[in-house]
Amino acid sequence: IGAAGSAKINQPTFDMLSEAAKESGAINNPVVRDQLMQVYTMETVKALIGMRTRADLKAGKTPGPGGSLGKLFSSIIAWKMRDIFLEMAGPSSLAWDPTDETGDERQRTVISSFQAGIAGGTDEIQRNIIGDRVLGLPREPSVDRGVAFRELTVGTQAG
C-alpha cells in the first residue's frame, strides 16, 4: 500500500487492551482474544492508510480519501476498545481507583471514546465522503445544494 518506507506500525489501543486482558485474566477467553486481534488488524490497516496518505502528500499528490478512511477507522477502533473494556472490566472500566496507576489512562480512554465518532466530522459524514469519492455512489438528493444557509426558507424561521 504505497511507499511505507521504514516507518513503524504502532498499535497503541491493542497494546493497552492486551495488557489489561493479561492483568485481568481475560486473555484466556477466546472471544476476547478474537476481539483483540480485530483491533490489531484495524490499527494496522489504519496505519497503512496513513502511510499511503503521507506518501501521496510527500509526492505532491492531492490527498485522497485517506483522511476520511483513517478518521473512520479511528472511530471504529475507539468504539471497539470501549466495548472490550466494558466486557472485561464492567462498570470499573468507567471509574477508577485513585491508587491504580494505569486506571486513570484506561478509564479516560474509555470515557473519551464517544468523541471519536463526532470530532472532526461524524462517522456518517465520513461514510458519505467515502461512498461519494471512493465507491462512486450517487449522492443523496439535495434540493438546497448551492443555497446559502441564510437564504433557506424552510426550517429557519423563528417559532
Image: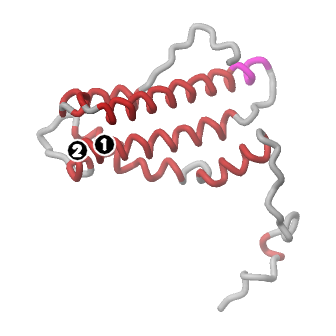
Mark 1 crowd level (few <14, some 14–19, many ≥20, 10 Å Cα): many
Q: Amino acid at mark 1?
A: Phe
Establish if 52 lies above or below 154. above
Main SS of the magenta part reads: helix
Mark drawn on residue 96: none
Location of the C terminus by quadrant is bottom right
Corner quadrant of residue 46: top right
Residue 29 is covered by the magenta coloring: no
Q: Secondary structure at mark 1?
A: helix
How far across and down, in percent of the image, does residue 112 sit? Answer: 39, 49
Location of the N terminus by quadrant is top right
How far across and down, in percent of the image, does residue 70 sit? Answer: 60, 35
Whole-angstrom CA distance, mark 2 to mark 1, is 6 Å
State the residue lying farthest toward the bottom. Answer: 159
| Nearer to me, 54 or 10 | 10
Is the Cβ of the residue at disc 2 closer than 8 Å to that at disc 1?
Answer: yes
Establish if 74 lies above or below 11. below
How far across and down, in percent of the image, does residue 68 sit? Answer: 66, 40
Which residue range is magenta in the image? 55-59
Corner quadrant of residue 21: top left
How far across and down, in percent of the image, does residue 128 sit? Answer: 71, 51
Q: Residue at x 62, y 51 (%)?
A: 121
Q: Amino acid at mark 2?
A: Ala
Mark drawn on residue 89: 2
Which residue is label 1 attached to?
85
Mark 2 crowd level (few <14, some 14–19, many ≥20, 10 Å Cα): some
State the residue lying farthest toward the front. Answer: 30
